[in-house]
Image (cartoon, grey):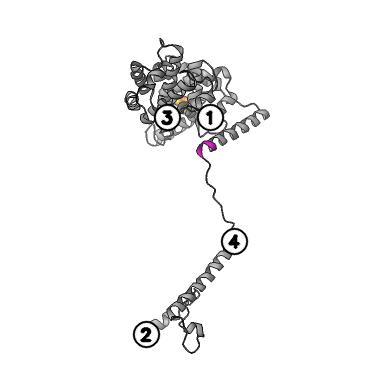
Amino acid sequence: MNKKLKLNNLTASPRYTRSMKKPQIVEPVSGSTATSSENTTSQYFLNKLTEKKLQAGTREVLVKKHKNPIKVEYESEPDDERKAGEAALLQTEIVKSEMDEKWEPADWRVILDNILEMRKNHTAPVDSMGCHMCSDPNANPSDARFQVLVALMLSSQTKDEVTHAAMKKLKSHGCTPGNIKITSKETLGQLIYPVGFWRRKAEYIKKTTDILLQQYGGDIPKTVEGLCKLPGVGPKMAHLCMQVAWGEASGIGVDTHVHRISNRLGWVRKPTKTPEQTRVQLQSWLPKEKWVEVNYILVGFGQEICLPVRPKCSDCLNVNICPYGADFKTSCSQSVASSGCEYAHYQFQYADDVN
Ligand code: SF4
């Protein structure tokens, strides 16, 4: 087959015919058939003009073909507002369901007793180095409360051992509002290093100290709302501060341990995503007289047995009644049978927990 024949065959093929349906550039208009205005226009621009008209026509067709409604994306609300909204919604849902039926997790008393039994030797870091152990017992009550607040601010994203060591250095330096006021941010940073986010925390402590001196006479606020207005203080810290510094059970202090263990134990009606959601759910069923102790009990339990990664379910007294422990037993028996590895197929949840 010669080249010419090949070309003829190609031009007659269905593929080529389909391509002809696409918008085509109009061939240059011959001089005899062109209008007067066209005659005064360059042939290049005439072609371009025709092409544009055709493209506009194609766009029109495309717009008409777009039958589905256009999805409008709104800007997300600021994080704080969204969280507050979520919390309020959750609270409403719980209150509503509480009116319908009283809910509490099965066997929670047995589970709590078992945890108390496992915690009876007080060997967890929180027992000797928690925030309740960080203030100077000889300090005046107002300064001691200030030290509790500072310890709580340092404890976020930081192990108890590190917080306790930083507080020891701070107390040697003089951890009173008056002394922190005259301490530079740089020196304060060096004193609290290496707690997590030490630079930002030094800044928060300085700002908080100024507020306490100006508005509270050097003492700390006695309400959750007042505490939450201080820089770097959230609901968890505020509730723990109310308990440790003022001896009041304003709410459950839910940190990463309490949040994780509550979800594993099924102590929340639905799995929760944030410690604040967990706090609201726990408070809906746990008797108020348990609010203070539950944080302390679960934190130590989370440090020693119900670890963020690879919880020691085989050592746990709750292994037969904990939903997560039941999964553990199943996965262990399967993995041991198949590979001999005790932790094969095990789920690594909460790997980002630090303390
Ligand atoms: S059985 Fe495992 S997951 Fe459940 S409470 Fe005990 S250690 Fe935690």
Q: Say if residue 323 shows up in the picture.
A: no
Question: Which is nearer the N-term, disc 2 or disc 4?
Answer: 2
Pointer 2 with pointer 4, Cβ within 8 A: no
Q: Nearer the viewer, mark 2 or mark 4?
A: 4
Q: Please indicate whether residue 126 sits to the left or right of residue 267 in the image.
A: left
Question: Which is nearer the N-term, disc 4 or disc 3?
Answer: 4
Amino acid under disc 1 = Thr
Give 202 or 305, whichever is nearer the viewer. Answer: 202
How far apart marks 2 and 4 lie (CA) works out to 46 Å
Give 231 or 263, whichever is nearer the viewer. Answer: 231
Q: Which mark is residue 289?
A: none
Q: Which residues are magenta?
A: 76-81
Q: Residue at x 37, y 36 (%)?
A: 339
Q: Which residue is mark 1?
A: 278
Q: Which residue is mark 4?
A: 67
Question: Which is nearer the N-term, disc 2 or disc 3?
Answer: 2
Q: Which residue is mark 2?
A: 4
Pointer 3 with pointer 1, Cβ within 8 A: no
| Residue 79 is a magenta residue | yes
Q: Nearer the viewer, mark 4 or mark 3?
A: 4
